[in-house]
Image (cartoon, rainbow, N blue to C red):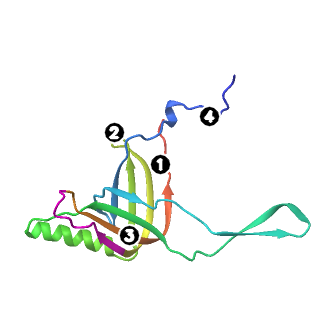
Amino acid sequence: MKVPFFITRSSHYDPIVAVRFIVLFNAVTLGFQSVSGIGRSQSVDFISEGGRNDYPIRIPKPQTEPHRLVFKRGYQMRKLSIAGLLAGYVGSQAIEAKDALGLILVLDESQSIKAIYSFISQGVVEWEVSNLDATRSEPLIETFTITHKGLKNIPIPSLF
């Protein structure tokens, strides 16, 4: 039995199994535990046109809800030093800046860039810290939600 061409896999198109990523806001590198909301959606209406009954026509609706990205990371306690305070200030300013250029670089296990997503941030709309519980020894997780003006997948040229 012959396998259809779209099902066969070659070593050239192996999936990325170990995901590592770097997030940059205005060229400031920030570490996060997870990023969610990477994707795109478009609301549409369908109308039927007289005389053409074989399929409805799709009409895009204007965007009514902002695009969102959610970033999670362990809450960091900084040493009381000029360098620590400056690093915290620069990082928070980069996240909270409006019209900040954001990049998410997806790396494989050999630290090669496999995907790049870019966006223009509109600033933080939600910020939350996980529940405080003195009976557990769990890390304190900080969650940021930002809105952005649209996500673009920047193609990575393949050399092989």
**The quarter of the displayed image where residue 122 is located:** bottom left
Mark 2–mark 4 CB contact (< 8 Å):
no
Give the quadrant of the N terminus: top right
Q: In terms of sequence position, does the residue under pointer 3 or pointer 2 come before the other?
A: 2
Where disc 2 sits, the SS reads loop
Residues 106 and 41: in front is 41
- Given the current orientation, which residue lies at the most extreme right position? 51
Residue pointed to by mark 3: 145
Q: Residue at x 40, y 71 (%)?
A: 146
Q: In terms of sequence position, does the residue under pointer 1 or pointer 2 come before the other?
A: 2
Residue pointed to by mark 2: 110
Left or right, 79 with reference to 100: left
Q: Which amino acid does label 4 sit on?
A: Ile
Which of discs 1 and 4 lies nearer the camera? The answer is 4
Q: Separation of disc 3 and disc 2 at Cα?
A: 30 Å
Residues 55 and 158: in front is 55
Q: In terms of sequence position, does the residue under pointer 1 or pointer 4 come before the other?
A: 4
Q: Which residue is drawn at 31% across and 56% down?
A: 33
Q: Separation of disc 3 and disc 4 at Cα?
A: 37 Å
Q: Separation of disc 2 and disc 4 at Cα?
A: 26 Å
Please provide percent x and percent y for residue 55.
82, 60
Q: In terms of sequence position, does the residue under pointer 2 or pointer 4 come before the other?
A: 4
Mark 1–mark 2 CB contact (< 8 Å):
no
Q: In terms of sequence position, does the residue under pointer 1 or pointer 3 come before the other?
A: 3
Where disc 3 sits, the SS reads strand
Q: In terms of sequence position, does the residue under pointer 3 or pointer 4 come before the other?
A: 4
Q: What secondary structure do most residues of the magenta stretch adopt?
A: loop
Q: Which amino acid does label 2 sit on?
A: Ser
Which range is magenta? 126-137
Residue pointed to by mark 4: 7
